[in-house]
């Protein structure tokens, strides 16, 4: 009887440890899946975060500059180049350096599911 009691106590202690581990993992998972704030600090300055497109996330979740870029691509209705979007935004498209930040924003929108990047480098709206 004493041996059985000792086995039950050992099993109880193992279950208590397993329960603590489970609670820690649940807290960690909850923290990882929490909603990300719209800005983050990188190297001491605020950086805009573009959310992934998904259920319950609409265009209003995007920063205003990204909303405008997305609207331009959607209004065209077909594939657009970075240069075409830059022209609508009023950028100096003759200077390649002016278009590279825009290309990055278009690529970020494509990477997050808001746009589709074609193999030829043009972008289309996802339907």
Image (cartoon, rainbow, N blue to C red):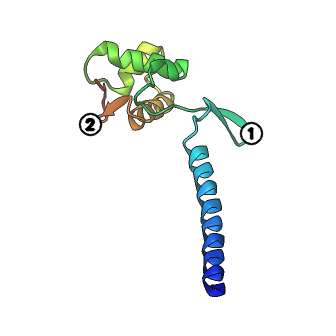
Q: Residue furthest front?
A: 1
- Name the foreground residue: 8 vs 29: 8
- Nearest the eye: 116 or 28: 28
How far, Cα to Cα, is label 2 from label 1?
36 Å
The circle drawn on residue 2 is: none
- Picture coordinates of residue 114, whole percent (x, y): 39, 28
Which quarter of the image is occupied by the N terminus? bottom right
Q: Residues within 10 Å of mark 2 (few under 14, many from 20)?
A: few
The residue under the point 27% across, 16% down is 77
Assign a secondary structure to mark 1.
loop
Residue 111's quadrant in the figure? top left
In front of the other: label 2 or label 1?
1
Front one among 104 and 10: 10
Quarter holding residue 123:
top left
Rendered residue at 66%/82% (across/down): 6
Q: Quadrant of the C terminus?
A: top left
Q: Is residue 5 above or below residue 88?
A: below
Name the residue that disc number 1 marks. 44
Image point (55%, 22%), residue name: 63
Q: Residue at x 40, y 28 (%)?
A: 55
Residue 41 is situated, as x and y percent measured from the top left of the image, at 69, 38
Specify the quadrant of the image occupied by residue 71.
Answer: top left
Counting from the top left corner in percent of width and height, residue 17 is at 65, 67
Q: Nearer the viewer, residue 6 or 35?
A: 6
- Callout count: 2
The image position of residue 85, as x and y in percent, is 39, 20
Give left or right: position of 78 versus 69: left
In the visual, does 52 lie left or right of 6? Answer: left
Q: Which residue is mark 2?
A: 120
- Local SS, label 2: loop
């Amino acid at each position: 009887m004493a041996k059985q009691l000792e086995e039950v106590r050992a099993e109880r202690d193992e279950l208590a440890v397993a329960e603590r581990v489970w609670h820690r993992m649940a807290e960690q998972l909850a923290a990882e899946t929490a909603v990300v704030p719209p800005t983050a600090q990188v190297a001491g300055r605020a950086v805009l975060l573009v959310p992934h497109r998904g259920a319950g996330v609409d265009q209003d979740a995007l920063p205003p500059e990204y909303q405008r870029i997305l609207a331009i691509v959607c209004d065209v209705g077909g594939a657009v180049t970075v240069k075409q979007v830059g022209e609508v935004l009023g950028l100096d498209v003759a200077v390649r350096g002016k278009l590279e930040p825009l290309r990055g924003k278009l690529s970020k929108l494509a990477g997050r599911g808001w746009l589709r990047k074609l193999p030829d480098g043009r972008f289309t709206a996802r339907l």
